[in-house]
Image (cartoon, grey):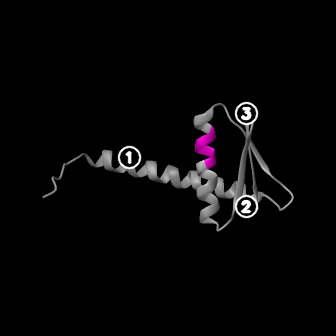
Amino acid sequence: MKIMKKIPIEEAKEKKRVVNRKSDKLEEYKSYLKSLTSSEAGEFRIKDEKEGFALRAGLKRAAEALNLKVKIQKRGDHLQFWIE
């Protein structure tokens, strides 16, 4: 049998906001992709590998949600992407 743990309602609501922030971030990535025309690419300057990985993952999730195929490449300290 599973053990239930009681927590304060504020803690439960706080965790829900994190999910909403992720949803907001997904919408942000979707807007980047939607704004591109067939003759344009987007580019982000990245500070480190961790940020690059997060951007790449976010763009891939957004492209999936929009049924698009996105090409992403890293060039030095920049991450470039376009719709295929």
- Tell me which numbered mark, 2 or 1, is placed earlier along the sequence: 1
What residue span does the magenta drawing correspond to?
52-56
| Residue 65, magenta (yes or no) | no
Residue at 51% x, 51% y: name it: 22
Give the left or right position of residue 66, taking residue 20 as reference: right
Q: Which residue is mark 1?
A: 14
Element marked by disc 3: loop
- Tell me which numbered mark, 3 or 2, is placed earlier along the sequence: 2
Q: Which residue is mark 2?
A: 34
For the residues bearing labels 2 and 1, Cβ distance under 8 angstroms: no
Looking at the image, which residue sits at the far bottom? 67
Tag shown at residue 39: none
Residue type, label 2: Lys
* Mark 2 crowdedness (10 Å alpha carbons): few <14, some 14-19, many ≥20: some
For the residues bearing labels 3 and 2, Cβ distance under 8 angstroms: no
Residue type, label 1: Glu
Along the line of sight, the residue nearer the viewer: 15 or 39: 39
- Tell me which numbered mark, 3 or 1, is placed earlier along the sequence: 1
Residue type, label 3: Asp
Front position among marks 3 and 2: 3
* Mark 3 crowdedness (10 Å alpha carbons): few <14, some 14-19, many ≥20: few
Residue at 12% x, 58% y: name it: 1
Element marked by disc 2: helix
Q: Position of residue 78 (x, y in %)?
A: 74, 38
* Mark 1 crowdedness (10 Å alpha carbons): few <14, some 14-19, many ≥20: few
Along the line of sight, the residue nearer the viewer: 29 or 18: 29
Q: How many marks?
A: 3
